[in-house]
Every structure is written in structure tokens, then in C-alpha cells.
Amino acid sequence: VRIAVLSIGDELLWGEIVDTNFARIAARCYDVGLPVTAHRTVGDDEAAIAAALGELAAGADALIVTGGLGPTSDDLTAAAAAKASGVELERNEAALAHVRHMAGRFGGDLPPANEKQALIPTGAVLIDNPLGTACGFSFDLAGCRCFFLPGVPREMERMLEESVLPEILALRRSPLVCRTLVFTVFGPSEAELGTRLEGALPGGRGVTIAYCVSFPEILVKLRATGTSETGVAAALDTAVSIVRPLLGEDLVAEGEEGLDAVLARLLKERGVTLALAESCTGGLLAGRITAVAGSSAYFLEGAVTYANAAKVRVLGVPEPLLAEKGAVSPETAEAMAAGMRRAAGSDLALAVTGIAGPDGGTPDKPVGTVYIALADSGGCLVRHCLFRGSREEIRTITAYTALDWLRRRLLVQ
Ligand code: ATP
Ligand code: MG
């Protein structure tokens, strides 16, 4: 079953709103084993909608349309649908009763705008909308079943689940099962990862690898398709057992879990406590750590020591050291971590200091220079990093890198 989707609305076309309806429809179709094969967006223009309907229907078995079923003058989908299939719009009594019911007007006159919502292409079948005034409808066009749904996301979703997907599933002859497992990876570049995993999976087993950069992480998606649930699960398991060891410690998390949750789990399992000393990240690390429920079990305290004076007073960084080496230096990072660990009495302390920009860089310490220090009972390790990007990106990747280092440290504990 080839499925096409048509999104309607000027605000979508002009980038004023994000097309979450399409994402939802596509993801749900994929879930039930019917990956979408084509998608188009058109504005609130009757001729453009009619043309897109004709073209998409010609190349699909089912077409899901969203948007433009409302009562206002910019809602043109029903008229365009009638035009595309060469029929008239006619007043549909069941649709009128529905609009009346939803608008709370059982007797008397309906605002003319609402009355317009009862105009449906002749011969179309209504799709119930339990949440709003706009009725959906469906009809066949060039051998393609076309479903028209409102643009309001919760109405669209409900109708998709209750009416459209069941009907589309009934169209298919042999069922297809699609499953995806997402690995979150951090460390290697996308290109390095591609090289590492190249040829890892035997061809023809129905499992593919896709890469997706989700800054600062890389998502490696293993997708399996087949005709049976067990066959697909087995193929995916085999692929996972091949790919997992190749990712090694660069594998941050699997499935829904993210770095923060993994870190929380490791800290709890290892029974170690943590303290943080932050300069350029201004509390981002503490924010992420405490975003996880139950973090009080291992997180003792964090300090945002932005000024040199704060580094001296709160963390005990020696003033002469700051004067000689500078706030952004391996020596200062080390002193911050060691000082924080001492002050908090924690097992581990993580410290970051760097230049997030856009100003403040020098030839030997350009914007993006960051030092991260990790102190434990055995001493203190310092890492130098040079990141590129906007202030926002440098702060984000600094926080991520520091937390990922902690994760790797806990893995070998
Ligand atoms: P209404 O009865 O509200 O007019 P409608 O079927 O005419 O419904 P639209 O006018 O196209 O639908 O959109 C209604 C609202 O739903 C929009 O203002 C927008 O916020 C949201 N919306 C529409 N299409 C989408 C989409 N593809 N993705 C996300 N939101 C959407
Ligand atoms: Mg509308």
C-alpha cells in the first residue's frame, strides 16, 4: 500500500508553524508497517490543492489530507476536493447535524460560516470527528482512497487512529512489520561512525542503518522490516548484537533512554556522589543532573563560579595560580574540581571552565577553548577541548562532553 500525505495551509508553507501533523501521520503509518511514500505541502489555494490531490492520488493507494476543513474563508479543502473529483459540493444532513451538535446549536440558525462546514463533495463518506465541528470525509480518486482530516492536531490524531488507519490497514494484502531501534552515540564524527559500521550488517536481511545528527549526539537507527513480528524481532536482535560491540563506549544509550538517564542510573548503581563546579556552562550541568527525578541520591551540590573571586572564595583556587595561568587553563580546571570535591565531600567532582564566545578569545586561547576536570580519590584528570559553533552550541557541547566523560568514567568503575 503506497501512502501519500498532503498538508494544507499557508502557515505551513511559509514556515510559521511546524508540520507536526505530517510527522505524526508518517510515524503512525510507519509503526503499523506502512511507510509513507510521498508528502507534499500546499497553501490555502483551491487550484493548488486540487492539482496536488490529483497528482498524489495518481501515485498512491491511500492519501491522507490534513487542514482547511474549518469554517473560515481560507478553508478551501472541501471545494478543492470536489473540483479534483469532478463533483459538486452538497449540503450533507448528517454533517449539518454534527456541526450543530458540536457548536451547541440544536435548534435555530447556525452561523453561516458553520453551515459551510456541512458542504461535502457529493458521494463522499463522512469520517466522525468526536472533538470538533469539522467532519472529515473520504472518497476514491483515480483508484486511491482519499481521507480528509481537519488541521487541528488533536482532532486529526483521534480521527487518524479511530477511522483512517483501520481502513488503510484493511487495504493491504500482506502485512508488513517495521521496527526501529535507536542508538544514541557520542564521540566519533558521523563520518567516522559510518566507516566503523560500514559493511557490518549482512545485506539482504531486511535491516538497514541510518544516521541522524541530533546535536551534539548522533543517532544510529537500525530499521528492520519483514512480514512477521518474530522474524523482524530476530533480525533486529542479530543486528544489535553486531552493532553494539562496534560502538563500544561511544554508545551512550539505547532506545528511549538518553545520556542524563543513563548517567543517573550509573551514579546510583555505583553508589557514588557528585559535585559540580561550573564556569562557562553557568549551571547547565547541574540543570541536567537535577532534571532527573531522584538525583538527590547522588548529587550533593553545584556552584556556578563565574568570577575569579568566586573561584577563589568558593572553591579555594589559589589567587596566584589564577593570575599566572588564567581562569581558562588546565591548572584552574584542576583546582576547581579538587576544591569542589574537598568542599562538598563528594566522591567525584566535575569542573568546567572555557570561553563560550563570541568575544573573549585570544590567539592561544580561541573561542571554544574548554578545560574539563574530573576529580576522584585518586587525583584529578584534565581534558582540553576546542569546540566550534555559536555560544549556545559551545555551552551545550561542553556540558554534554563533561557529562559523557563522567559516564565513561563510571562504566569502568
Ligand atoms: P479549523 O476548524 O480550526 O479551521 P481546519 O481543518 O481548517 O480547522 P486549519 O485551519 O488548517 O484546519 O488549521 C487549524 C489549526 O491547526 C491551525 O491554526 C494550526 O495551529 C493547526 N494545524 C493545522 N495544520 C497543522 C499541521 N499540519 N501541523 C500542526 N498543526 C497544524
Ligand atoms: Mg481553518
Image (spheres, helix red, strand yellow):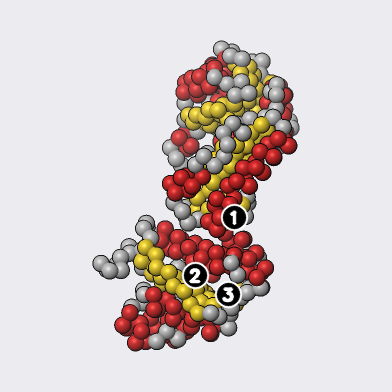
Q: Earlier in the sequence, mark 2 or mark 3?
A: 3
Q: Dot 2, crowdedness within 10 Å: few (<14), some or many (≥20)? A: some
Q: Quadrant of residue 145?
A: top right
Q: Which of marks 3 and 1 is nearer the N terminus?
A: 1
Residue tagged 1: 253
220 over 384 or under it: above or below? above
Under mark 2, the amino acid is: Gly
Q: In which quarter of the image is residue 58?
A: top right
Q: Where is residue 6 drawn, in percent x and y?
A: 54, 28
Position of 403 with respect to 230 (left or right) is: left
Under mark 3, the amino acid is: Leu
Q: Where is residue 395 drawn, in percent x and y?
A: 43, 63
Q: Is mark 1 on a helix, strand or loop?
A: strand
382 over 178 or under it: above or below? below
Distance in Å between CA atoms under marks 2 and 3:
14 Å
Distance in Å between CA atoms under marks 3 and 1:
21 Å
Picture residue at 70% right of the left edge, 21% below the top: 173
Which mark is drawn over residue 283? 2
| Residue at the top extreme of this rendering | 86
Residue tagged 3: 274
Between marks 2 and 1 in the image, the one whose residue lies nearer the viewer: 1
Distance in Å between CA atoms under marks 2 and 1:
23 Å
Which mark is drawn over residue 210? none
The C terminus lies in quadrant? bottom right
Q: Do labels 2 and 1 touch, CB within 8 Å?
A: no
Q: Is residue 383 visible?
A: yes
User: For the residue with label 3, is its CB less than 8 Å from the closest atom of ligand 1?
Assistant: no
Q: What element carries label 2?
A: loop
Q: Which of marks 2 and 1 is nearer the N terminus?
A: 1
